Amino acid sequence: MERSYLLTENIVKNLQNWIDNNTYHHSKFQDLKSLVAEKQEKNLTISLCLPTLNEEKTIGKELIIFRSELMERYPLIDEIAVIDSGSEDNTLEVARSFGADTYLSSEILPELGKKMGKGENLWKAIYQLNGDIIVYVDADISNIHPRFVYGLVAPLIKRSEVQYVKAFYDRPLALSGSLRASGGGRVTEILVRPLFSLFFPELTAIIQPLSGEYAVRREVLENIAFPIGYGVETSHLIDVYTKFGLGAFAQTDLDKRVHENKPTQDLGKMAFGILQTFLKRVKALDMFDSTHYETTLRQFQAQNDHYEQKLIEIIEEERPPMIEIEAYREKFKKQMI
Amino acid sequence: MNNLENLKRELPELEKKLKKYREVLLANLVMIGEIPSPTFGERERIEFILHRFDEAGLTDSSIDDAGNGIGILSGKEPNHSILINAHADTIFPAKTDHTMRVRRRSITGPGVADNSLGLAVLVTLPYIMEDLGIRLNNDLVLLACAKSLGRGNLEGIHFFLNNHRMNIQSAICIEGIQLGRLSYSSLGMLRGEITCRIPESYDWSRFGDASAILTLNEVINRMNDIRLPRRPRTSIVMGSITGGTSFNTIARDATLGFEVRSESQEIVDQTGTAIQDIVEEVSSRTGDQIELDIFSRRTPGGIPYSHPLTNCAREVMHALDIEPRLAPSTSELSALIDKNIPALTLGLTVGESTFKTNETILIEPIYKGLVQLLGTIISIDGEYCEKSTKLD
């Protein structure tokens, strides 16, 4: 019990340091002129990948905004590519008409076969795109803004030790100075955060582990495996964490992200895919036999710009089958089988 | 060959060059359009515009006491200033979803035509002009004016015109649609609301007869009977009507929004008096409270058809195969005319569903609208049309 307490104390201290030092708000990086200068000084190239599947409603706007603000006005990104899983609508025509390089995922490395899934597109982008940094942004965001890109690449430009920058959204406001719960979506809070709390407590510092927007250095991307479906974000976090440690991560608050909500049944599919990926990794890391499981669930709370973890001790104690209780057996004149 | 002929010859080529600014212009349009900007609530949109002016290196860009955003593109040897104006407010409340939808050939969203496109062109002009090396002799004053529509009653531009210290010799108001619009005169106008209310102590035994909507209906019928002259052209626009709360509750209040427009100030005044008489008469007969609130008036005026400014615009439109559609205006143009500043209003592209949330504009004609504006500015700046020029 004492060992467990000390472990928890260390983790919390470590996590709070990491949260304080590696959590940003996009507004810190809005001086694009100086960001571009720093990028050029460090001789970095940046590719933007938009994975798509039937996104004709939103892709045009994303391209206009990114090309105007981050290529024409401030040359922060060097290429924009749409990698499509086989859209049946006009996604590719719209994307081409607004000047994007468009690729069918199945036509990249065709000798390796064709697989359907967002992870497949992200993985093939590593081969197709040329940047030292690849930033992935989902194509279904209706309130798109340049911050979705510069907020993520800036920590990589500014800090060489940072390898992987993750987005989080909907910064909760402190109303009347009170604390408000903060966190991810339903799958994050119901599935991923409890799993991380059990097996990888440090990864609970990532506020939205499933967000679809992140920027990563090529050296990291080329060294991790890519589940092709729902598990890609979860596996990235576990693999980068086990290879490079928590210090390789940063996260940026991108404020509000407006997109269509998924029905609960779709979330079930997502959770199922994530669970498969997760179990595969836990097994590979030989963690099932661990004698010590964490019993602290780590959630987030925020006040103004400050985030801190909220620790909830949940010990699932159990009672034995009633038949094992002598008083019960006497009362009902029963015997152990 | 004179300067105007040279300019006209270059315009088609300029139109092609403008296509490379598509992303910058449309990104400005989307970002401006997604910031809600109801009349009296334009601050956030104006701040965005100011940020754009600052990024373009405009001198003296600022927000004045009325909330207008102003940027000045300095000329080489300025004798005077040319004002480009776009109103920054929309008819849509802040709670309306302001998401812009970008399709291959069109953009849809509330206020995209009226007047996000005008504002986008306003903030993109300095970027384009610098990139193309177009440097004017005179100062170009870019004004995103606040509190223009409805009860705003042109407050923003009135404040600017009453307080600026620039030598503004001509002005162009830009509106998203329709391409070809050429307004150089303003109509006399009177705008107001008539509100009928059933008093608290109403005799509810008059079952089925007591309703603010019925009373307002009577007022409307009477207004409809006002005899309007065919010349000078005059009309009463019954623009909006609200009232009541549900199917089965007697309406306690009802409001009509209306506008009287005429080429003659005298007719506007006479019609206003006639409406006042109707309101008093219906009120005294029914016992209902009826309020007439006239909150906006304009006087008619304008520049002649052959004025150099109109000539410039017509010459440029002609060179670009744009058919001018002459129509008087009741918008910011009238404030400029009141101050004796020669002014006109131009449209920038083709669109539809104005004033609805699915307001839509076409992308391709914007280049023509933009080159029309640039050509007109250059010809005003170079005084190419000072002498009346006969069209081919």
Image (cartoon, coloured by chain):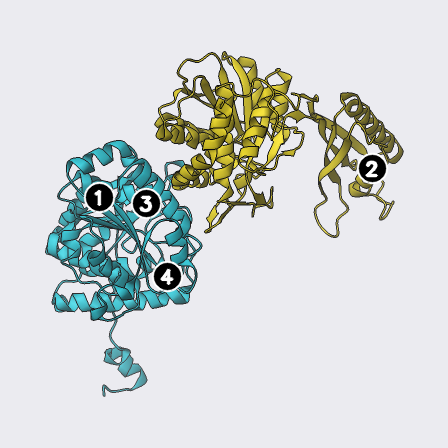
Residue sitting nearer the eye, B33 or A320: B33
Residue B42 can be seen, yes or no = no
Please name the residue that numbered disc 2 is placed on: B224
Q: Mark 2 lies on which chain?
A: B
In the displayed structure, does residue B168 sit left or right of residue A235?
right
Residue B213 seen in render: yes
**Chain A color in figure:** cyan
- Kindly indicate whether the residues beneath marks 3 and 4 are on one polypeptide chain: yes
Determine the CA span between mark 1 and mark 4.
34 Å
Q: Which of marks 1 and 4 is nearer the N terminus?
A: 1
Q: Could you say which is closer to the camera, residue B187 or residue A277?
A: B187
Query: Which circle marks residue A148 in the picture?
Result: 3
Amino acid carrying label 3: it is: Phe
Instruction: Give the SS element for disc 4.
Output: loop
Establish whether labels 1 and 4 are both on one chain: yes
Q: In terms of secondary structure, where does tag 2 sit? A: helix
**Amino acid type of the residue that numbered disc 4 sits on in the rendered structure:** Leu
Q: Name the residue under label 1.
A: A19
Give the residue at mark 4: A53
